[in-house]
Image: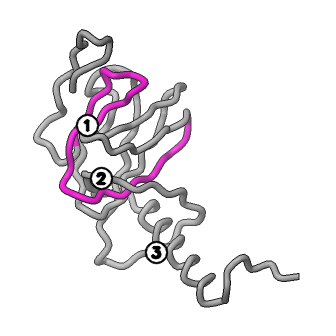
């Protein structure tokens, strides 16, 4: 019975190397980035090379305003992993103001994303007054309700 779901051993080793690189970025807890994102779920921490941008953890600590994220603003380099750690008891759906979806962060969970750009503002669509900034001088202003029942960012 063949247990390897890949075509060959070389493909399986390449996939394992990629997973280990993602996990290494997740394990580092300083630095970071902003812009568009891709998400991944790490499995086991491992080491990384010095050419890899540092990672940063953004703690979700509330449901209102710019104080809901810590740190805020986030300082991160392009290519870095941002670990979104939810310390609250509710689900948060993080989206960049440019429309890039980071994703759902369940209570007690951490969601990793990779910064592919210079940064920008972000918010939680479940709690529209939760706002933040990556590589900004300060957090963005609190969104204001619009006539269609949504919020302007």
The image quadrant of residue 96 is top left
Instruction: Look at the image and tell me in which quarter the N terminus lies.
Output: bottom right
Range of magenta residues: 108-133
Residue 44: image location, x then y, percent? 58, 65
Residue 109: where, in percent of width, then height?
Answer: 54, 41
**In this picture, is 132 found above or below 114?**
above
Residue at the front extreme of this rendering = 148
Q: Quadrant of residue 146?
A: top left
Extreme residue in the left direction: 137
- Asked which secondary structure carries label 1, the reply is loop
Q: Residue at x 29, y 56 (%)?
A: 32
Q: On the image, numbered disc 1 is attached to which residue?
A: 97
- Inter-mark Cα distance, 3 to 1: 33 Å
Would you name the residue on which mark 3 appears?
A: 47
Measuring from the top left, give residue 124's x and y in whole percent. 37, 30
Secondary structure under the numbered disc 3 in the rendered image: loop
Q: Is residue 139 above or below residue 56?
A: above
Q: Residue at x 30, y 57 (%)?
A: 115
Mark 2 or 3: in front is: 2
Asked whether the residues under the numbered discs 3 and 1 touch, taking CB atoms below 8 Å apart as contact, a structural biologist would say: no
Residue 20 placement, left or right of 28: right
Whichever of callouts 2 and 1 sits on the residue coming sooner in the sequence is 2
Q: CA distance from mark 2 to mark 3?
A: 25 Å
Could you say which is closer to the camera, residue 88 or residue 128? 128
- Mark 1, Cα crowd under 10 Å, few <14 / some 14-19 / many 20+, is some
Badge 3, how many Cα within 10 Å: few under 14, some, many 20+? few
Residue indicated by mark 2? 36
**Vertical order, 112 against 140 (above or below):** below
Mark nearer the N terminus (2 vs 3): 2
Residue drawn at (35%, 53%), measured in percent from left and top? 37
Q: Which quarter of the rendering shows the C terminus?
A: top left
């Amino acid at each position: 019975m063949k247990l390897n779901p890949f075509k060959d051993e070389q493909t399986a080793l390449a996939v394992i190397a990629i997973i280990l690189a993602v996990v290494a970025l997740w394990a580092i807890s300083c630095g970071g980035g902003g812009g568009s994102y891709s998400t991944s779920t790490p499995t086991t921490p491992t080491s990384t090379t010095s050419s890899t941008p540092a990672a940063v953890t953004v703690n979700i600590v509330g449901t209102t305003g710019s104080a809901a994220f810590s740190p805020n603003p986030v300082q991160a380099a392009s290519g870095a992993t941002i670990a979104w750690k939810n310390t609250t008891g509710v689900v948060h759906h993080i989206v960049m103001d440019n429309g890039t979806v980071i994703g759902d962060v369940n209570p007690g969970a951490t969601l990793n994303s990779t910064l592919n750009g210079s940064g920008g503002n972000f918010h939680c669509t479940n709690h529209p007054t939760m706002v933040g900034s990556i590589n900004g001088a300060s957090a963005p202003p609190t969104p204001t309700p619009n006539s269609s029942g949504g919020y302007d960012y």
